[in-house]
Image (spheres, helix red, strand yellow):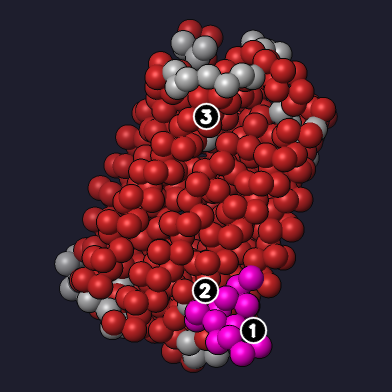
Amino acid sequence: MLSMKARLEARKVYGLGIPLIISQVAIVGMSTTDTIMAGWYGTNDLAGVAVATGLWFPLLVLLIGIISGVAPFFAQGYGGKNHLEIARVFEQGVWLTLGLSAIVCAILLVGIPYVSLLGEASSVTEISSGYLAAIVFGVPGLALSILGRCLCEAHGNTRTPMLINLVAFVVNIVLDYVFVFGFGDWEGFGGVGCGWATATIYWLTAIALLRHVAKSRRYQKVIKEAEICRPNLQRQKDIIKVGLPSSIGTTAEVSFFAMVAVMLVPYGADTVAAHQIAMNVASIIFMIPLGTSMAIGIRAAHLIGEGNYHHARYSSFLTVKLAAATAVVTAVATLLFKDTITTWYTSDVEVIRIASTLLIYSALFQFIDSIQVICAGALRGYKDTRVPMLMQIFSYWCAGFFVSWSLSIGAITGTDWGAEGFWMGFVAGLSVAGILLLQRLNRVTKRAKTLNIN
């Protein structure tokens, strides 16, 4: 049983967190729709979308992470009622989103011609290239939507982004169907249509969020302080100093998972498709601790802005415990319903068999995955991102990737575990990350009063 103090604090964290969780589920739900629609269209289309998202996701996470560096500045400014500081950060955030969008678009355009070198059938790589080309159109919209969402959430308003994402989820279903299967006499784009639907949603979400910020009374004090200004390199450097390590750490995790999708290409379309299905299911479940992680980052930053360091530590560790308990429930549910869930994505018997097996490993890492992401979120509220970045890189690319690669080719056991070997590496990498980040959170929160967090 939770004490009264714990119940009150949990209510505040999950008051922020539940809308964030729903938002994240809606966002991943759009990816799920892509996967389902592509799977219905054909196994090659599903494999093509899987390879494309594997290549796009590291860039996506890097972009989100850097721009989200504004979040602790917004939240600590809100906690300290410093509206001028929030306005100055927002102004430079706009410049930052424009610059980063241009860089990401250039990387995609330069890299698309090389997708055909991955070794998969041309029918698959053509779909992957078309998907990525469509994504280029949506990158600026995505960047602006991240900035708008961070401002809303830092003000404790997680409900509006949730509602916008829910509407976007529904609209994405319609767009996916039209772009993939066509409408009337138009035959559609097949798997490539998922990319055009996603890019369109990026822009619609950005327009909705920024319009809300401009019209809502909640942000008028910030808007009154805002002005058209030139880029301030020092302030952008401060944002990047927080956002870049965080994004690199998260990208280390996501790129580790994404690289596996690429390395599974030689195993055939069935294995790649099964991996995509299992990853999609795991990603949906992961939205619960991820949304909670974002909430504790906001809550901790608010408390730090108020100067209440002791309560920020209490809230952080309470959230770790609650998230771990929730993970036990989701892991059991995954094991019980894995066979049924996979049939929602495809009727291919071999793909279902492989995906169901991989979901066993998903259940195994959910507990420690929840702990590591909550710790990372809380540390972000303290603007502590550099050391966690190094811990994440070591965990995923030294420990996790070594185990994945070794088991997949049989270097350790003498048996080629294939896709299962890679997923065993997921368990290893996340376990190391969870242990290291938990220790870091304990150390940082104990000495928070002496940290230069302003």
Location of residue 410 by image quarter: bottom left
Q: Amino acid at mark 3?
A: Gly
Residue 250 placement, left or right of 151: left
| Residue 248 location (% of width, % of height) | 37, 40
Q: Residues within 10 Å of mark 3 (few under 14, many from 20)?
A: many
Q: Which stretch is magenta?
A: 175-190
**How many neighbours does mark 2 have within 10 angstroms: few (below 14), some (14-19), or many (20 or more)?**
many
Of 265 and 362, the residue lying toward us: 265
Residue at 57% across / 21% down in the picture?
A: 228
Q: Secondary structure at mark 3?
A: helix
Q: Amino acid at mark 1?
A: Phe
Of tags 3 and 1, the one toward the viewer is 1
The CA span between labels 1 and 2 is 12 Å
Query: Disc 1 or 2, which lies upstream in sequence?
Result: 1
Q: Which mark is residue 183?
A: 1
257 above or below 146? below
In the picture shown, does residue 146 fall above or below 32? above
Query: What's under tag 2, amino acid-wise?
Result: Gly
* Mark sitting earlier along the chain (2/3): 3
Residue 384 position within the rendered picture, expressed as x and y whole percent measured from the top left: 45, 25
Residue indicated by mark 3: 93
Spot occupied by residue 294 in the image (x, y as percentages of width and height): 60, 38
Of 12 and 183, nearer the camera is 183
**Residue under the point 29% across and 42% down:** 394
Which residue corresponds to mark 2?
193
